[in-house]
Image (spheres, rainbow, N blue to C red):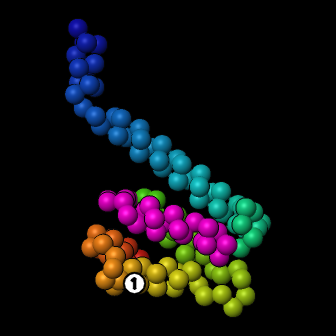
Amino acid sequence: VRADEEGRRAKASPRPAVHDRADALDALMSLLFRHLELHLPLGRPWPTVEAAWEELYPTFESTILQTHKCKFTQFVFFYLASLPPTTPNSQPLHRTFTSSLLTTALDPSASPNTRQYAACYLAQGQ
């Protein structure tokens, strides 16, 4: 009887599945940060931090920025933007990121949601 009762409680509450997914996402983010920390200084798979940014940032603009209530993935971009430039005379990526978000937030041709999301990211970066 007790096992049957516990089974009903587990079915009624989606919390364990949510926690499992959150734990999996945390583990994946941890692996991604570790990968970036290990490989960016070695020039693999990108020769510079700026090259990584140039390849990954379009994904931010086309997918992450457009996603309502995206909570964690953007921290990859905050991390990349925090790294010092590796190309001589290159603008720091945090300035590039901020400038791009500001341009999007003020762009009258962008959708209102996209403009709002860009403004929210600017506020997070403060």
40 to the left or right of 70: right
Residue 90 percent across, percent down from the top left: 66, 87
Which region shows up in magenta? Answer: 49-71
Q: Is residue 7 above or below residue 44?
A: above
Q: Is there any visible trace of residue 123 in the rendered image?
A: no
Q: Is there any visible trace of residue 72 in the rendered image?
A: yes
Residue 8 percent across, percent down from the top left: 23, 20
* Main SS category, magenta section: helix
Q: Which quarter of the rendering shows the N terminus? A: top left
The mark tally for this picture is 1
Question: Where is residue 72, by image quadrant?
Answer: bottom left
37 to the left or right of 56: right
Q: Which quarter of the rendering shows the C terminus? A: bottom left
Query: Residue at horizontal 45%, vertical 43%?
Result: 23
105 to the left or right of 57: left
Indicate yes or no whether the magenta region holds residue 55. yes
Indicate yes or no whether the magenta region holds residue 93. no
Query: Residue at horizontal 24%, vertical 32%?
Result: 13
Q: Is residue 113 above or below residue 86?
A: above
Q: Dot 1, crowdedness within 10 Å: few (<14), some or many (≥20)?
A: some
Which residue in the protein does label 1 denote?
102
SS at badge 1: helix
Return the residue nearer the eye: 7 or 90.
90
Residue 18 percent across, percent down from the top left: 35, 40
Residue lying farthest to the front in this orientation: 109
Query: Residue at horizontal 60%, vertical 71%?
Result: 53
Question: Amino acid type of disc 1?
Answer: Leu
Question: Where is residue 91, by image quadrant?
Answer: bottom right
Query: Residue at horizontal 65%, vertical 57%?
Result: 35
Residue lying farthest to the top in this orientation: 1
